[in-house]
Amino acid sequence: MSRPPRARESVLDAFEQILIADGERGATMDATARAAGVSKGGLLYHFASKDALEAGLIERLNTLVDEDVAEITSAPEGPVEYYIRSSLSVGDPLDRAVLAVSRLAQAGNPAAGHALQRMRERWADAVRPHVRDDAALNLVLLVSDGLYFNNLLDATASGSVVPTGADLDALAALVRDVTRP
């Protein structure tokens, strides 16, 4: 009997959520199967080991980064402005994958660390042709990092420090203008 295609994604969703909430130690095969609502045999059908499960999550991240790079390079407002604005995306599939893979990297998984490094390089490669030099590229990347980090803080604190609306428009335009070739 074939497994429904959604079962594999449900297992990855569960593993991802456990990693985010409880870290790598809490993300056992048993906990993942329970959270996904599948038997241990069902989990093993899709992922024969925890290493395979981790590789599946890294593969998910790589696919989401491919999609994000395509969005960056085709954005009507331009790659720099899109990249700045998309830094405020928290809780979307890419963000969840980044957080979960970060947990694996923190636990010493070299493939996870490499995937995160490659993600950053791919974003830089997508933005690089649209800025004047490496200093401008670093400015875009660091502003993006700051927006992302502060947006995460806003999720748990009162009093927003993250620009929105017209303030975000002004920031994105300023970064675009300052870094333009």
Image (spheres, rainbow, N blue to C red):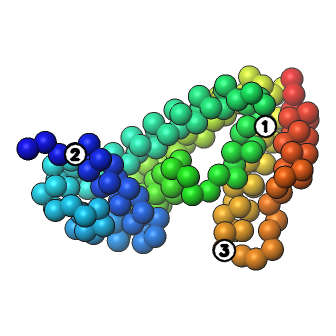
Residue 82 visible from this viewpoint: yes
Secondary structure of the residue carrying numbered label 1: helix
**Could you tell me the amino acid type at mark 2?**
Pro
State how far apart marks 2 and 1 are (Cα): 40 Å
Q: Residues within 10 Å of mark 2 (few under 14, many from 20)?
A: few
Report the amino acid beneath label 1. Answer: Glu
Q: Which residue is mark 2?
A: 4
Name the residue at 89% across, 50% down: 166
The mark nearer the N terminus, 2 or 3, is 2
Asked where in the image residue 177 lies, by quadrant, the reply is top right
In the rendering, at what x and y percent does residue 77 appear?
78, 31
Mark carried by residue 156: 3
Residue drawn 76% across the image and 77% down it = 158
Tell me the number on the disc at residue 81. 1
67 up-or-down from 94: above or below: above
| Amino acid on which disc 3 is placed | Thr
Classify residue 32 by image quadrant: bottom left
Q: Is residue 108 visible?
A: no
